[in-house]
Image: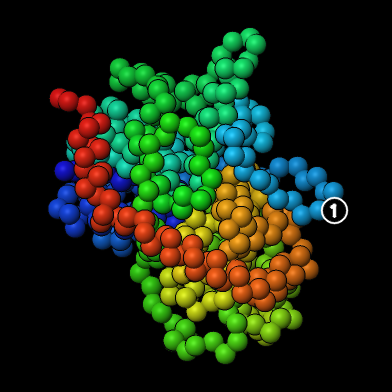
Amino acid sequence: MRVLFLAGINKSHLYAMTPLAWAFQIAGHQVRVASQPDLADDVMRTGFLPAPVGEVLRMNEKLGPAAPPRVDDGQPRKWEKPVDGSFPEDPHGHLESISTGFFPLVCPDSLFTDLIDFAREWRPDLIIWNSLALAGPVAARVSGAAHARLLFGADGLGQIRAAFHAASARNPSGPLNDPLADWLRPFLQRYGHDFDEEIALGQWTIDPMPSWVWHPTTNVHYVPIRHVPYNGPTRVPDWLREPPSRPRVCLTLGVSHRESHGVEASATDLLEAVSDLDIEVVATLDKRQLAERPRIPDNVRAVEFVPMNVLLPTCSAIVHHGGTQTFAAAVESGVPQLIVPSAYWTEKWWGPVAEGNGLERRGAGVYVADSDFLTPDLLRDELVRVLKDPTFKENADRLRAERMGTPTANEVVPLLEKLTAQHRPRA
């Protein structure tokens, strides 16, 4: 079987796909990884042949920093992901915003053209596409391949689509126009096909999020898969081999934001919060992020990168932005988490809100506040509470034990083979 993976916008999205891609390769299938040209070298470092498609993405230059208007009532801003499938804002307006202002930047016209050409030439049986890379299902429909979404975080688009369809059904003037269909339909019609909900949400969805993270109440076919941390080529630093002499806390904003928009919690606030605590802090911040604070506290070790699957087993807690890879690695390591979501657009709805609320409900972490409402005092108080209360660690260990029962990539491949046979159009 030929399996084509379509990566997302950066290395984190690529790395999230890599264990499953290797599971297919080890099972004897042919695997290629398509991505924009600037990720081709990263694809090669994972051990796969890259298929460069589209163009270099410069989202930070095209979009610029963006955040919703800040309404400060003196309280930490935290959002509850609704359990009834609704959406906290106008779902039609939000769908229109991402369909006209965001998705076309992630998937420019050249990506559709190049990917369709490659798929028609290589003839994959299955295309597995990052949930933001909507050229994937279009290329699958045109080339006759089965296709599946691989979620990167919570199912934000599933939530938006469910809320949009509900709002459309209630609209007294009749069904609302579908902005996502308006964007994708011309690509499909060019090859004699039309838009349907499979194009938006996949024939099925490979879901690396724990079951207790919010999922929309839709007819999406979810295939659970256990996250396996993958960090790319790296080395373990010598200092990490020594056990910490006091509680170790990881402080990270991931790598994705460094390379794109960077609308995140202030490094000054984060470091100020931990500066007077009797703990060892490992802060994975680069020079740009540290530039606003010339002096690093004595209890902080600043490093640009450390593999989370090696660092986290030595930690008593982690403070982070809600990145999916970081969140999953912390769950796998049984580490209590304090989440401070980015303020960029509505990025929080694609993972951090669902993660933070899920952890709080299970007593394994804290949703501290959105990054634009964070204060050093608030973070310090919450971190002290997590470190002093042993139930946070006990509950994190319980979630880790539960997660060990989720099928790994190797165990999921046979099911994906069957689903491919069921969904691929007959010649």
Q: Is residue 287 visible?
A: no
Which residue does the image show at 60% across and 22% down from the upper left? 167
Residue 344 position within the rendered picture, expressed as x and y whole percent measured from the top left:
63, 48
Left/right of residue 326 with respect to residue 25 in the rendered view: right
Quadrant containing the N terminus is top left
Dot 1 falls on a residue whose secondary structure is loop
Which residue does the image show at 61% across and 74% down from the upper left? 390
Residue 7 position within the rendered picture, expressed as x and y whole percent measured from the top left:
37, 47
Pick out the residue farthest to the top.
Answer: 173
The crowding category of the residue bearing disc 1, from other C-alpha atoms within 10 Å (few below 14, some 14 to 19, many at least 20), is few
How many numbered badges does the structure rendering display?
A: 1
Q: Is residue 369 visible?
A: yes
Left/right of residue 98 with respect to residue 172 in the rendered view: left
Residue 293 position within the rendered picture, expressed as x and y whole percent measured from the top left:
71, 72
| 232 shown above or below 142 | below
Quarter-wise, where is residue 395 in the image?
bottom right
Quadrant containing the C terminus is top left
Circle 1 is placed at which residue position? Answer: 74
What's the coloring here?
Answer: rainbow
Residue 245 position within the rendered picture, expressed as x and y whole percent measured from the top left:
57, 90
Left/right of residue 298 with respect to residue 151 in the rendered view: right
Is 52 in front, or is 279? 279
Which residue does the image show at 59% across and 35% down from the upper left? 84
Q: Amino acid at mark 1?
A: Gly
Is 390 in front, or is 107? 390
| 290 shown above or below 113 | below
Which residue does the image show at 49% across and 62% down from the upper left? 399
